[in-house]
Image: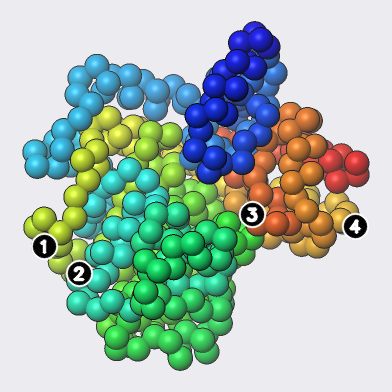
Amino acid sequence: MQEIDRSLRQTEAAHTSGAYFKRPLTLVRGAGTRVWDDSGRSYLDATSGQGVALTGHAHPVVSAAIAKQAGELVTSPEIFFNEHRALLYERLTDLTPGDIGRFFLCNSGAEAMEGALKVAMLLTGRNKVLATRNAFHGRTLGALALTWNPKYRQPFDAWHGDQVQHLAFNDLEAARAAIDDDTAAAVVEVVQGEGGVRPADAAWLRDLRQLCDDHGALLVIDEIQTGLGRCGSWFACQQADVVPDILALGKGLAGGVPIGAVCWRTSLGNLPAGSHGSTFGGNPLACAAALATLAVIEDEQLPQRAAQLGNWIMSELAGLQHPSVREVRGLGLLVGMQLRGRVTPVLMRLQDRGVLALPAGFNVLRLLPPLIISEGELKEIVVAIRESLDD
């Protein structure tokens, strides 16, 4: 197995794009909160595959829905009607806040942000867009214009023009100065994930909502990582009592099958015919997987679990009072631990101890476990973090 593994890794390394920092680990199987490598070792997956496996790996309900649909009809573009797409629209209308009831289905969170920008510009007739410092909304060219980190954005600045302005996060005066009658949209995350797991102030989000209303701008909330129970409610914006004009979804919406969704208020109207499109968007396989995933999230009360267990693990991590930790913060089971040094060595020590976790910038350890995780498994993660920090 090791000889085969070395050969496969060499093949992948010889042909990969180079865009990813690869860890020396080959994953071959997942079940629930755990994944296994090619030597049979198991790991607690506190990455959820970059926040995707909300219901865990290979959940039997989701897997059965995927298998059934794969044997019936995989693809059907939106030029035709399809029952699974209709049912997903209906389900999302019931779950999303306010009068959200129009949807464009695509294949990823970044595509959802691209779509959200087009929706905002088409429905307002304006081009000016506001985002926040330390925001991350994706790496495609449009979404990249909203992303703050220069290492991602600067090589492509020539494509972006000067239509996007970045404001200080949680700064009301900066928002007041920037939002005007030329603004198409203000785009925010309720919790900045890549930007260091930094929650937005609820009062600031409500003030943004009012400023957008005052100037006829649209409030776009990126819930690609925070939505669908991750933060302790179906959508994190609900905890601030804020209803967006446009909501972007992705990651865990279909339990691991690629999907994204642009969701907007019915009262805003439809897009002009032909103004946007997606060959694979809204395909029956992804829609069937999404319907099964949403059913599991509801039936197993995963938002409530995320709220309870998130509070528990953040309290436990803060209680370590470790000298190498500056702060523990987050919302639900989106948890960040800011360190006094680089996070990469800690991630590798955690991996050696059988726990997979993520960075959020240079010095923040990010935990994104499946929402089905148990308190006992979270205790294992806390112990592994303490030992890794002690090394």
- Label 1 sits on what residue type? Pro
Gap in angstroms between the C-alphas marked 3 and 4: 20 Å
- Left or right? Give the position of 99 relative to 129: left
Q: In which quarter of the view is residue 318 placed?
A: bottom right
User: At 27% from the left edge and 69% from the top edge, which residue is drawn?
Assistant: 120
Q: Are dots 1 and 2 in contact, CB under 8 Å?
A: yes
SS label for mark 3: loop
Q: Secondary structure at mark 2?
A: helix
Quarter of the image that includes the N terminus: top right
Q: Residue at x 38, y 33 (%)?
A: 257
Q: Is residue 300 left or right of residue 319?
A: left
Is disc 4 placed on a helix, strand or loop? Answer: loop
Among numbered discs 1 and 2, the one appearing first in the sequence = 2
Residue behind mark 4: 323
Any part of residue 235 in sight:
no
Mark positioned earlier in the residue sequence (1 or 3): 1
Viewer-nearest residue: 265 or 154: 154
Q: CA distance from mark 2 to mark 3?
A: 33 Å
Report the Cα–Cα distance between label 4 and label 2: 51 Å
Q: Which mark is residue 272?
A: 1
Q: Earlier in the sequence, mark 3 or mark 4?
A: 4
- Mark 3 — residue? 360
Tell me the distance, in whole angstroms, between the alpha carbons under discs 1 and 2: 8 Å
